[in-house]
Image (tube, rainbow, N blue to C red):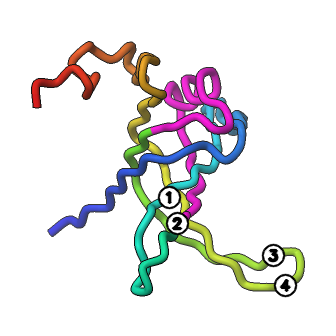
């Protein structure tokens, strides 16, 4: 039986996208996103926890990400997750969560249009206009 490796993230870009090309000519764009959650601790104190993910987009999705995304922009990402470990400059072991994006949707503040890599979002995506 085949396994499933799928991750869905909504977060903000921590840096501007960087696009490059492989020797074979494939476009790849990389950026990081921060995903935060708010919670209340056992002692009743409000806390925020942030996880960072490195994201890579390939081919046409890479070109769209490079053209439209910028640091601070909120984005929806679907893709595959991979963890890796490496040694930093000081010789300390570090861990990284890497996502290869298969779908990307640019999100915005209320009143701004949300767009997908396939084109503009429809009016039905505006949650404030839903009847419930």
Left or right of residue 48: residue 3: left
Q: Magenta segment, which residues?
A: 50-75
What secondary structure is found at the residue carrying circle 1? strand
Residue at horizontal 16 percent and vertical 24 percent from the top: 130
The mark closer to the camera, 1 or 4, is: 1
Of all residues shown, which one is farthest toward the left?
131
Left or right of residue 59: residue 119: left
Relative vertical location of residue 5 with respect to residue 83 in this rendering, above or below: above
Relative vertical location of residue 112 with respect to residue 80 in this rendering, above or below: above
Residue at horizontal 46 percent and vertical 44 percent from the top: 101
- Alpha carbon separation for disc pair 1 and 4: 29 Å
The mark closer to the camera, 2 or 3, is: 2
Determine which quarter of the picture holds residue 96: bottom right
- Residue designated by label 1: 36
- Alpha carbon separation for disc pair 1 and 3: 25 Å
- Residue designated by label 2: 48
The mark closer to the camera, 1 or 2, is: 2
Quarter that holds the C terminus: top left
- Residue designated by label 4: 91
- Residue designated by label 3: 88
């Amino acid at each position: 039986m085949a396994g499933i490796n799928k991750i869905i993230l909504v977060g903000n870009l921590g840096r501007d996208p960087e696009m490059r090309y492989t020797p074979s000519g494939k476009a790849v764009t990389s950026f990081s996103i921060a995903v935060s959650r708010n919670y209340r601790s056992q002692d009743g104190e409000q806390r925020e926890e942030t996880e960072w993910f490195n994201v890579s987009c390939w081919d046409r999705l890479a070109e769209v990400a490079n053209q439209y995304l910028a640091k601070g922009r909120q984005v929806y990402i679907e893709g595959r997750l991979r963890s890796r470990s490496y040694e930093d400059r000081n010789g300390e072991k570090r861990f990284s969560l890497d996502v290869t994006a298969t779908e990307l949707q640019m999100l915005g503040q209320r009143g701004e249009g949300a767009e997908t890599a396939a084109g503009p979002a429809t009016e039905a995506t505006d949650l404030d206009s839903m009847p419930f």
